[in-house]
Image (cartoon, rainbow, N blue to C red):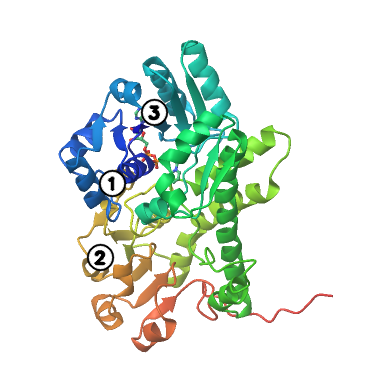
């Protein structure tokens, strides 16, 4: 079995390396020659725990190779996966499919013998059919099927997610393509991973529905956390109280500064656009998109409120820049809203992130970049936790207090224990916990009826 993986980013590189670990011969292709050069030198272009060893092992055994030109890899492949980016299209929020169709045309030119072309990229419902038409038009003679196999891995735990997924979804009506993909995923099949075979449209839509549901869950608990602050309730206990109900589940009920990342923002937007176009608007998803955007913008206001109404001339230490821990991915990270708002309000921002700084430096200006947590905190007027890296949980409150000019901590991820922070003499603000919210006192709320 041979696979060509077209696009060697977060999804393509992890999937390619994991398929090679299954014993399949994989060539990962990318247009970005710099990326392929680095991979050929054994240097991993992204931060993903465990990926360096996995790539090194399989490259050394000769099962995993890297190339800029897809033609050789596609010609030899039984399955060609498309794992290129599908960002938001500027202006209207639809998924930009330029890279997908470019890849499809290049693949078409190289097809040789029966091949399954698989869209692993997150693509709007109907894209598989269009990819098939493009390839058929370019190569009426080719023997191929187009299947959908959306990817559900999470950055930061991508290898474990790929090797032990909750499910695999394969969308195709072709029996031949099904059998080939069943062989590709055989190790997972033997593991008793649920493998859902369905049609292409269903597989495409299931990916968007999953992301929209998770984004909704996060946004729901974020709004509940605002209410908690107003009424003296504790969002952690509310989350536990509802999450222990098996119908709801405990995951994705952690309040924070709003979801970001490479998937939820663009996928919620694209799904809302698809639905509106189909004449069945998804009003819940549209609202989630709006509520989340407003929330991210308002996070800087919390910092300003914690500083007594102004950050002008103050030094703000920001810990965490990436959209979540254990990745270097800065796409749509809340820090990209918070930091510019703080500098616009006159703050001097000092920042540190364990993995995100090389990318953050390209996206943010007027920031003093620090080499560690305590360097960022030194002489700061306020400390803001934006991403919940484990290293930040281990900060010593006494040391934080003595390093800072004034002892104000705004914890947008609730990583600290309020009592410990108070005991160290820190003025601590977190999210959705009684008396600790954005400076508001709990109000008694009575049923208006
Ligand atoms: N990042 C995630 O956590 C995640 C999870 C699940 C699904 N997805 C989806 O997977 C897809 C890829 O996401 P990503 O985060 O890996 O993107 P990415 O931007 O990290 O990687 C995409 C890569 O494709 C390359 N590329 C573009 N056109 C090409 C072409 N014609 N030939 C060869 N290479 C080409 C780019 O140079 C880039 O390296 C997206 O649709 C995304 O929504 C991402």
- Identify the secondary structure beneath mark 3: loop
> Badge 3 is on which residue?
78
Where residue 168 appears, as percent x and y from the top left, is: 50, 47
Location of the C terminus by quadrant is bottom right
Location of the N terminus by quadrant is top left
Where residue 10 appears, as percent x and y from the top left, is: 35, 44
**N-term-proximal mark, 2 vs 1:** 1
Query: Quick check: which quadrant has ligand 1?
Result: top left
Q: Report the front residue among 143 and 337.
A: 143
Using the image, determine if residue 371 lies above or below residue 183. Answer: below
> Badge 2 is on which residue?
376
Q: Is mark 1 within 8 Å of ligand 1?
A: yes
**N-term-proximal mark, 1 vs 3:** 1
Q: Report the front residue among 47 and 343.
A: 47
Where residue 232 appears, as percent x and y from the top left, is: 60, 80
**N-term-proximal mark, 3 vs 2:** 3
Which residue is pictured at 32% across the width and 68% down the height?
390
Q: Report the front residue among 220 and 130.
A: 130
Which residue is pictured at 68% across the width and 37% down the height?
276
Whether residue 401 is visible to the viewer of this picture, yes or no, is yes
Looking at the rendered structure, which numbered label has been put on residue 21? Answer: none
């Amino acid at each position: 079995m041979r696979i060509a993986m077209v696009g060697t980013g977060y999804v393509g590189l992890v999937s390619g390396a994991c398929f090679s670990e299954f014993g399949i011969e994989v060539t990962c292709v990318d247009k970005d020659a710099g990326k392929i050069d680095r991979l050929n030198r054994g240097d991993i272009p992204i931060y993903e725990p465990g990926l360096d060893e996995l790539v090194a092992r399989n490259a050394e055994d000769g099962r995993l190779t890297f190339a800029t030109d897809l033609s050789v890899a596609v010609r030899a492949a039984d399955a060609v996966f498309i794992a290129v980016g599908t960002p938001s299209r500027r202006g209207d929020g639809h998924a930009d499919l330029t890279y997908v169709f470019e890849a499809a045309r290049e693949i078409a030119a190289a097809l040789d013998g029966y091949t399954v072309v698989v869209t692993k990229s997150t693509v709007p419902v109907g894209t598989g059919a269009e990819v098939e038409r493009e390839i058929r038009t370019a190569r009426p003679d080719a023997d191929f099927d187009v299947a959908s196999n959306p990817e559900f891995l999470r950055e930061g735990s991508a290898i474990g997610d790929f090797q032990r997924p909750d499910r695999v979804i394969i969308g195709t009506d072709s029996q031949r393509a099904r059998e080939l993909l069943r062989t590709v995923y055989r190790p997972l099949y033997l593991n008793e991973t649920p493998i859902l075979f369905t049609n292409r449209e269903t597989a495409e839509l299931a990916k968007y529905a999953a992301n929209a549901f998770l984004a909704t869950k996060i946004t729901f608990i974020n709004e509940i956390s605002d209410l908690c602050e107003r009424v003296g309730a504790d969002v952690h206990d509310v989350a536990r109280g509802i999450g222990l109900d098996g119908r709801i589940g405990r995951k994705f009920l952690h309040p924070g500064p709003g979801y970001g990342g490479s998937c939820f923002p663009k996928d919620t937007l694209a799904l809302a656009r698809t639905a509106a176009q189909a004449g069945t608007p998804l009003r819940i998803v549209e609202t989630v998109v709006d509520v989340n955007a407003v929330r991210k913008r308002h996070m800087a206001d919390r910092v300003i409120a914690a500083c007594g109404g102004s950050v002008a001339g103050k030094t703000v230490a920001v810990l965490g820049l990436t959209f979540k821990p254990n990745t270097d991915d800065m796409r749509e990270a809340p820090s990209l809203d918070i930091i510019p708002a703080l500098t616009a309000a006159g703050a001097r921002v000092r920042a540190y992130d364990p993995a995100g700084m090389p990318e953050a430096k390209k996206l943010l200006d007027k920031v003093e970049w620090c080499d560690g947590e305590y360097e960022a905190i030194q002489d700061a007027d306020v400390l803001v936790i934006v991403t919940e890296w484990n290293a930040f949980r281990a900060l010593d409150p006494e040391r934080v207090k003595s390093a800072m000019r004034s002892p104000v901590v705004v914890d947008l991820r609730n990583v600290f224990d309020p009592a410990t922070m108070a005991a160290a003499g820190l003025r601590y603000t977190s999210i959705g916990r009684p008396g600790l919210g954005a400076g508001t006192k709990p109000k008694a709320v009575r049923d208006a009826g």
